[in-house]
Image: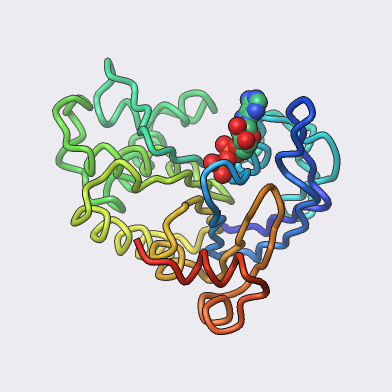
């Protein structure tokens, strides 16, 4: 079940630094939107506010029709995947994936079934008894993804999830992520500084510079009709 996300004039200050300025954005249910911008432009801060880890200093955010600004993170129904997988080292794969369900007090039989389904989606069922240090980086990232989707979140946030993977694996995981997103029909906000990643994966790209949303458009429009010089040079750049 996917949900829309609306950011209305969202602001964030760190002391005198205006890190997120006036974010206005509507993400449709099932849409894959990428925050693309250089390092330090405010992407992660924006994501943390959506997740509930940082309070905004102004504005409102709605998940579906519900304002989430005052809702604690674990009650927002949002899944998250980070660059450094952050799996629990002392738990097996199955226990890692089950963790969000235990926190939500889901019944034991249902946990088993949901864990197997999530592991099936990321093609890791046969690894369920292993520990994280017995897995490759790519496999650990699949488990982190399974853990993020196991409780049927209405929105999935991903912060540079492919950043730690080598080039070949990154190409493969891009395709896998797109497949899983389509299968679940889940709304995704994806953060990256990599133009290629953004152009290939997203329905729309929100280009961010110095805390501002400069242009929000599909890949073609950004490429052929960049709104300003920053978008043209940043999106046109190759790695
Ligand atoms: P990005 O994800 O685009 O690299 P960030 O959102 O991490 O950018 O950071 C945006 C700006 O906010 C940077 O200048 C960063 O130094 C600053 N910043 C981020 N988090 C904090 C914090 N907790 N305290 C103070 N400044 C911060």
Q: Nearer the viewer, residue 120 or 63?
A: 63
Q: Position of residue 87 (x, y in %)?
A: 34, 27
Residue at the far bottom in the pictured view: 224
Q: Quadrant of residue 33?
A: bottom right
Can residue 115 be seen by looking at this rendering? yes
Q: Nearer the viewer, residue 125 or 13?
A: 13
Q: Quadrant of residue 65?
A: bottom right
Q: Nearer the viewer, residue 160 or 158?
A: 160
Task: Ligand 1: give its quadrant.
Answer: top right
Q: Determine the residue positioned at 76% across, 40% down.
A: 68
Q: Quadrant of residue 182?
A: bottom left
Q: Report whether 19 appears left or right of 229.
A: right
Q: Position of residue 90 (x, y in %)?
A: 27, 15
Q: Nearer the viewer, residue 126 or 201?
A: 201
Q: Determine the residue positioned at 50% across, 53% down.
A: 190
Q: Report whether 224 appears left or right of 198.
A: right
Q: Determine the residue positioned at 85% across, 39% down.
A: 58
């Amino acid at each position: 079940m996917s949900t829309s996300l609306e950011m209305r004039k969202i602001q964030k200050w760190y002391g005198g630094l205006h890190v997120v300025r006036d974010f206005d954005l509507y993400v449709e249910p099932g849409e894959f939107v990428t925050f693309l911008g250089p390092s330090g432009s405010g992407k992660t801060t924006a994501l943390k506010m959506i997740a509930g880890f940082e309070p905004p200093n102004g504005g409102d955010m709605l998940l579906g029709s519900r304002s989430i600004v005052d809702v604690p993170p674990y009650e927002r129904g949002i899944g998250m995947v980070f660059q450094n997988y952050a799996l629990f080292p002392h738990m097996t794969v199955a226990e890692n994936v089950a963790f969000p369900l235990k926190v939500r007090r889901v019944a034991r039989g249902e946990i088993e079934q949901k864990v197997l389904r999530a592991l099936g989606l990321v093609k890791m069922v046969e690894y369920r008894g292993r520990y994280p240090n017995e897995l490759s980086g790519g496999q650990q990232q699949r488990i982190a993804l399974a853990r993020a989707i196991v409780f049927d979140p209405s929105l999935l946030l991903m912060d540079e999830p492919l950043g730690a993977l080598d080039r070949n694996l990154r190409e493969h995981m891009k395709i896998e992520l797109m497949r899983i997103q389509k299968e679940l029909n889940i709304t995704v906000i994806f953060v990256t500084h990599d133009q290629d990643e953004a152009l290939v994966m997203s329905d729309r790209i929100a280009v961010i510079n110095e805390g501002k949303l400069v242009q929000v458009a599909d890949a073609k429009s950004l490429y052929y009709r960049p709104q300003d010089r920053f978008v043209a040079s940043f999106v046109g750049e190759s790695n």
